[in-house]
Image (cartoon, coloured by chain):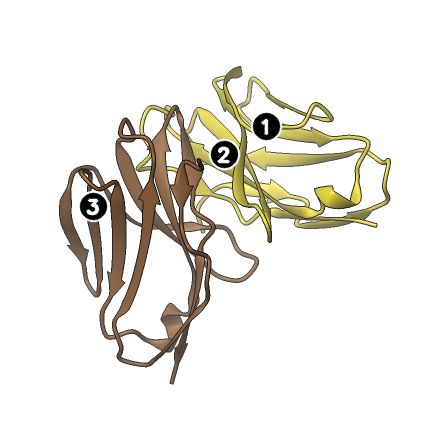
């Protein structure tokens, strides 16, 4: 158990809908990352937050948004969903985001868009 | 050019064989080099990380980094069926991890 908690584990939704994925980082970790994993693209970095502030942005679509709350949990919002958004979405956390050797991943949220 | 290249082909080996995996990367500014193991539909778990060129051993696992060639490798000695998983190389740079596509390894008893 990495200590990173993600909910829900699975969800199925229709095209055009909106979903929210939630992540609780490990105790003491201030930085949260979101990744998308699909069969063809592999693990793609979406966005990073550190102590409530956006720190780095990757290949995140405009239909997607994220935030980190004062209690350090984070939410990834996916809207106007398309079939191609079906993927595993992972959250990862680390203490300060300054180095890569202590990043721990949650178990992921499996999104299926039908 | 992708930041990290990992030939995503599957690999099947008999139990006890040596598994050899490798990746190349493009940005010489990258500092940390990691290998993650991922079981089916689970989160990636950190297997090993290295900072400098050279070898790092941890039990049956050896990670190797050659910064001059921008080449990283993972060797698994005396492979076991429990090693069957997807192995992903990852490079730390620009405040995030960039991943290779992963190799699915199957160790046949």
| Residue with the most extreme front position | B1
- Relative to residue A59, is residue B20 depicted above or below? below
**Where residue A66 sits in the image (x, y, percent)?**
63, 24
**Where residue A49 sits in the image (x, y, percent)?**
51, 22
Which mark, residue B65? 3
Tell me how far mark 2 sits from mark 1, CA to CA. 8 Å
Q: Chain A is drawn in which colour?
A: yellow
Mark 2 or mark 1, earlier in chain? 2
Tell me how far mark 3 sits from mark 1, CA to CA. 34 Å
**Where residue B47 sits in the image (x, y, percent)?**
32, 52
- Relative to residue B55, is residue B26 depicted above or below? above
- Relative to residue A107, is residue A96 depicted above or below? above
Q: In this view, does B93 lie to the left or right of B53?
A: right
**Where residue A77 sits in the image (x, y, percent)?**
71, 29
Q: Chain B is drawn in which colour?
A: brown
Which mark, residue A25? 2
Task: Looking at the picture, tell me which residue is in the foreground, B59 or A16.
Answer: A16
Q: Mark 2 lies on which chain?
A: A
Q: Name the residue under label 1.
A: A74
Q: Is label 2 on the same chain as label 1?
A: yes
Residue sitting at x 59%, y 28%: A74
Q: Is label 3 on the same chain as label 1?
A: no
Q: Mark 1 lies on which chain?
A: A
């Amino acid at each position: 158990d990495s200590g990173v908690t993600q909910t829900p584990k699975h969800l199925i939704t229709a095209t055009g809908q909106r979903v929210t994925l939630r992540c609780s980082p490990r105790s003491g970790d201030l930085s949260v990352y979101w990744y998308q994993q699909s069969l063809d693209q592999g693990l793609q970095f979406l966005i990073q937050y550190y102590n409530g502030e956006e720190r780095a942005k990757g290949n995140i679509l405009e239909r997607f948004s994220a935030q980190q709350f004062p209690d350090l949990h984070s939410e990834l919002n996916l809207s106007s969903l398309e079939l191609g958004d079906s993927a595993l979405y992972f959250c990862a956390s680390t203490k300060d985001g300054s180095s890569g050797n202590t990043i721990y991943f949650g178990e992921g949220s499996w999104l299926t868009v039908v | 050019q992708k930041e990290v290249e990992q030939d995503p082909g599957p690999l099947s080996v008999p139990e006890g064989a040596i598994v050899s995996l490798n990746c190349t990367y493009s940005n010489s500014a990258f500092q940390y080099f990691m290998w993650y193991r991922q079981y089916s539909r689970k989160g990636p778990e950190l297997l090993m990380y290295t900072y400098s060129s050279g070898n790092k051993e941890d039990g049956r696992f050896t990670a190797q980094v050659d910064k001059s060639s921008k080449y990283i490798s993972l060797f698994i000695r005396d492979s076991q069926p429990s090693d069957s998983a997807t192995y992903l190389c990852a490079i730390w740079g620009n405040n995030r991890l960039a991943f290779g596509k992963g190799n699915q390894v199957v160790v046949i008893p």
